[in-house]
Image: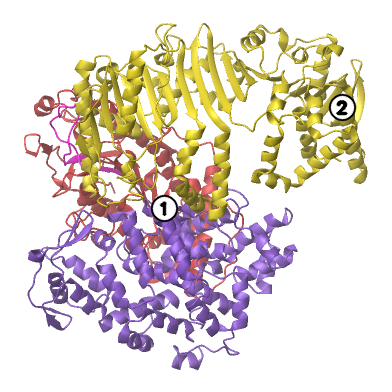
Amino acid sequence: MFRKRETLLIIPVLILSVLPLPVARAADALPARHELVPAGAVIVLNFSEPKAAFDLILRPKLIEAVESSPLYKAQVANKGFRQFRSLVRLLERRLETDWKSIVRRLGGGGATWAVGPGKSNLFIIDALDTKVLKEAHDLLLFLVESEAEKKGLPSRAGSTKYAGVTCWSLGPNEAHTIVGRRLMIANSPNILKAALDLRAKTGGKSIASLPAYQQAIKAAPSDAAATVYANTTVLKQIPPVAKALAGQNNPLIALLAAPITEALSNSTWLNISLTIKNDTLTLDAVSDGTLASTGAARFALPAKTSDGAMPNLKVPRRIAAMSLHRDLKGFYAAKDKLFGERTSGLIFFENMMGIFFTGRDLTQEVLAETGPKIRIVVAEQKYDPAAGKPSIRFPAFALVLPLKNPKKFSPVMEEAWQKAIGLVNFTRGQNAQPGLIIDRPVYRKTKYTVAAFTPPADDAPKDVDVRFNFRPTLAMTGNHVIFSSTDSLAKDIIDALAKEADRPTKPLAGMHSMLEMNGAQLDSIMEANRKNLVRQNMVEKGHTQQQAESEMDLLSAAIRTVSRVVLNIGTGKGRSKMSLEVHLNLPPAGSGEK
Amino acid sequence: MSSELQTRPWQRYEPSARCPWNLTRAAHLWRRAGFAATWEQLQTSLKAGPQKTIDTLLHPKGDVAAFNRTCDNYTRTVGSSEALRAWWLRRMIQTPHPLLEKMTLFWHDFFSVSAARGAGASQMREHVALLRAGAMGRFGSLMTAVSGDIATLLSLETKAIRKAKPDEALARHLLARYTLGAGAYTDKDVRETARAMTGWFVLRNQRRYFEREHDAGVKTVLGKTGKFNYADVVKIASEHPATARNIVRKLYRWFISEADEPTDALLAPLTESFARDFDVARLVETILRSNLFFSTGAIGRRIKRPVEFAVGIIRSLEASAGTTRLAADLASLGENLYYPPTGNGWAGGRYWINHATVIGRNNLAASLLSASGPYGGRCDPAAIALRHGQADAKAAGRFLASLLGGHDDEAFKRLWKDQPRGGSLSDRLRKFAYTLVTQPEFQLA
Amino acid sequence: MGQSRREFLKSTVGAPVLLSLGGAVPTFLARAAGAAKTENRTDRVLVVVQLSGGNDGLNTVAPYADDVYARKRSTLRLRSNDVLKIDDYVGFHPRMKGLSRLLKDGQLAIVQGIGCPGSDRSHPGAMRNWHTAQPNDPRCPTGWIGRTIDYASCKAQANTPGVFVGPIARPFALTAQNAIVPSIRSARQLTLRGKGAPSKRRTSDNPLENHVRNAIRGAHATSRRIRGLLADASRSGSYPSQGLGPHLKTVAELIAADVGIRIFFTELGGGGIGGFDNHAIQRDNHAALLGHLSASLAAFAADLSARKCLDRVALMTFSEFGRTLTENGRKGTGHGNAAPCFLMGSKVRAGLIGKHPPLTDLDNDAPRFHTDFRRLYATVLTGWLGLDSKPVLGADFKPLDLFVT
């Protein structure tokens, strides 16, 4: 007899198979799948355009790459996986085709997976033709029965008629039926019955009839390959979700995430859709929850609808960039609501700020001087060959803030910066470590302050100390202040800001958080640190150098697969929106199907 | 105790009916001279006999120099002493020359130089490299190197030893801890030694000498008189007969027994021989080859240090482990490598074991032997049993009982009978290995 | 409770063995063994709470009625209608309601004017002095709690007389020459994860093996008791959810589990990162810390009282120094010297102990101490734990009269 785990193995096959070629659909029109999903469902996952996904995943080069990966090879050693594979082989022989076409035919018509209420699960899978479905189903029943026979047990597979169709059950937690080229699977007979009632229009309400669901579906792009609808009113009550949406104790997380958690807290639905186009996966999330002008997270809400975060700054060798719209004064003023606990880290921060800014009130007299368009840039460093490369190479990073009254506040900022450097030097001096030397050079008419360590005395330094990754720099240009870990990044940012000033750049309306990442650049800095990462892996996992190297190769290959990630989050017009674009670097699609 | 043992404790051990060469003694030798043996090492040793096995331990076949060069290379860019700990543990787990690492650890305990008082990672790395390079050489050379080493000076909080303000605490530490031992010198020796050490400064983590701050006058130190300087007094102290006695006594505790305090008479042959040229390798060899070393008065007469406990499990099971985490776990058991608790080293012995550290050892063993979790299941008793031809549960259990504790068949049956049945073979053997390494006997070295 | 303690001792070290050891019996165990027999002076526990960073005593127990204080503290000053009055001169910071109530309930002594001679007023230097209790020896290798543990335990026993509870590196006060002093974050860390029972009692001719067997039995007993106690989820107390709150909850659990730990050391202030070192914009930060301290201590007292162990416990607080009287230009204060320490427990002589240092006679802008901190140490060592303090402190320090008999 099939044990539960094995049955579970079959279900994903069937689901995987779920994505439709938009052919031959008209021939035997079925009602839309969501019309069979009971209204109480909390999460509904719908694959409407499986072809794009199949085209993406089922290209020979990619399959080849997966099959040669150590991870896959480890899976092959797994007994369950081998059983699953032989099952697929069997099906291949019976349908006289390869598994890829089977997958396309089984799932080519689209699929829907509904979760909830409670623990109920319902799958609806539309095949392209009835033959493939029938074959797969016959095979399944045959296997269940022969397994039972082998063990000398009565088969638990049984069938019955309900609402005019034959339903099967392979155990107490499984019930399914086939209607034409549609397969419906539920984890209890009652759920299947509810779906069949909706089909027969003999009772119940479907999710498709709910206004919230309709709004959510409308908000998704029409060419989405897959969508997930979530009833957030119900979801929010689940303890871990509730906990995640409740306040944060970490101020930085609160600064970044409060607008998102607040929007979700205010929502009744969330719809996430996946679009696949030209090797780009786009996840669009839309929700009816927005930021209230009275809420704790209003510090992220632009004053005008046309306002928002600025486009990210472009600098050479950029690994990542973030642009935020955050009113820091408003954020800090709401600190008791946003991060109630005064951790020692927070107190330390406030103490230091008090010292650097000579007792000025942090909220009213310091943060109030900054504008809301905050930008952060992380870039790989280029090292001066004469000074040597540090043994561990950190990326350079910088924070760019607008100042409201640059003339008045610049001297205050400069003084605070020099005090901070002074404190670093004092602490290092106490530990007999070399200190930073301050210089004030000029770049593009901007006088900036750079603090640097004296370079090592050797003629051809190699693997210099980690401290040479840092040349902390403060630059004030126009109405921007730049805090950078290196002067060279500060100069790149001065260039970028100058370009921005030349061609006035508009903020992105409604956006409050934007993040961009570059896979190749990330891979490049990992490669630069490879020796150290390998060594760290060796002592962390007890690996040999070889094992550590191959783990790094795998990670590196995974990172290279992603050429660029762009995340934009915003709010406005009664909706909150998030879009995540993942630009992939896959083996060419040209060699696509055989 | 046999009469042989009473009359000639330091004579070469020859197996006899009363004192046979067996698994217990082979395992004892490997534990003391290293960090426990693999099954194959035990089997080879049983065939080769004790003296040949000791030959191998003293002069291993593998390319030790190449191994240590590779390890040195790995640690070259390590940025903290916490990270260095992981690399040292890895070296202990993998070295083809465990006795060398064991002796390096001995000197680390002996000199007790800590990274907690200012020495950085590169200085600590150099310091332990000095200990390793001199671990089996002449004590005088090691002492000279260590006494001028910056990590040592930082650890002893030496700042400026001015002519007008000689550092008596430093001089006392040199005599009491590093050379002669407590009570073997007078207060005047301390004062005169301190005078000789004047002129040395530690500035920006560099050792510097200022002639004008050196007291160039005549000093009388330990019965010798002259215009001694820093190096002179270090040499005088390290060549003193009391120093030989002090080190022999410490090595007795290290290799033979913590359970008793040996008499001077018992140690006299070793002390006299060692005082001739302070050759550590010969001293260690004499101890390892002796009747006393293989007597019941030595077997099980030490408590395993946390490092011996963990590295022993890993080496016996021919496994590896993430040593970053292991270093932290061992620190919580009281042995924080590179950070001895005080300038007097680890008290060790019975102090290793208290309620909290027993709980800690058991929980560490549970993690190391678990199929998943922080150590990733890399110690796999079933795999080792299988590698040595034991596929059936009970046979594999018997094999492990022998490997991890030298239990005889009766003891094995007693332990095996209380084991839960059922579950996969791999899990059962993991649990049984946990039982074995948490036995009282396993805590003894 | 008494019954279970007896069982515990029996399971750890056989009482006859202990008594037969005579003079060699460690003080802790001798008393414990006596207790098991006669149940008179039970195992007393000392809890030390370190307030890292230099707590501003002048705004903790504020001399609100003092004109000098009023003049020198322009933004930080607490007025007579702010404070929770203790007498007509000093009062608690308004956030310290919990401690104010403990004072009224007769469970809190405020020991005023405590300090360290020759303090250099640097964090590491001053903290080192409080930790070593040897202010004249900057190279002192051990801490006062570590020495107490070494002195009070002996080779023959395997219990764990002292622990540090907290997430930071173990403070130097607990550095011992011999004993291994654990650092834990929760009581669960002192429980066994693997299954199995200790092997049957057997005596070997190898004293080390006997020692290990004893320790293993003790470890199993410790684990069993803590597990049993943690299984009772009905008690959670009303501790603050982070910082000192959970640490003191762990301490209360371990005291109630009665596993032989006699000294607990814990900390508020992140080991000095942040904490009480309020050089700038002190008001809100200091208020939050004092509120947290007060709430944690009050919750601890209530929890111990509910667990019926309050009579066995004394808790003392200390900080490396107090702060300067004059406010600096950044609405903060500098490093000072004398400050009050709190001593909490049902057996303490409650109230203000000693005079408030006069603000007209300052030592470099800070209140002058009149009581050497080592007298406070001597008090808890001798007056509470019943130990001779001289071997620990290196000299005789006259204990203060802080406990009711």
Q: Disc 1 on helix, strand or loop?
A: helix
Q: Is residue B432 left or right of residue A566?
A: right
State the residue at coordinates (73%, 22%). A51
Q: Residue C233 appears at what percent x and percent y?
A: 54, 38
Q: Residue A524 appears at what percent x and percent y?
A: 47, 38
Q: Which chain is purple?
A: B
Q: Label 2, on which residue?
A: A132
Give how far apart the Cα atoms at labels 1 and 2 are: 58 Å
- Within the image, what quadrant is residue A369 found in? top left
What's the amino acid at mark 1? Ala
Closest to the observer, C116 or A468: A468
Residue stretch rendered in magenta on the structure? C313-340
Q: Is residue C397 above or below residue C280?
A: below
Q: Is residue A363 left or right of residue A380?
A: left
What's the amino acid at mark 2? Val
Q: Residue A496 appears at what percent x and percent y?
A: 36, 22
Marks 1 and 2 share the same chain: no
The mark found on residue B83 in the picture is 1
Q: Is residue C329 magenta?
A: yes
State the residue at coordinates (39%, 17%). A326
Q: Is residue A492 above or below residue B363?
A: above
Q: Is residue B126 visible?
A: yes
Closest to the observer, A550 or C334: A550
Q: Disc 2 on helix, strand or loop?
A: helix
Number of residue marks: 2
1 vs 2, front mark: 2
**Callout 1: chain:** B
Closest to the observer, A390 or A235: A390
Q: Which chain is red?
A: C
Q: Is residue B384 above or below residue A188?
A: below
Q: Which chain is yellow?
A: A
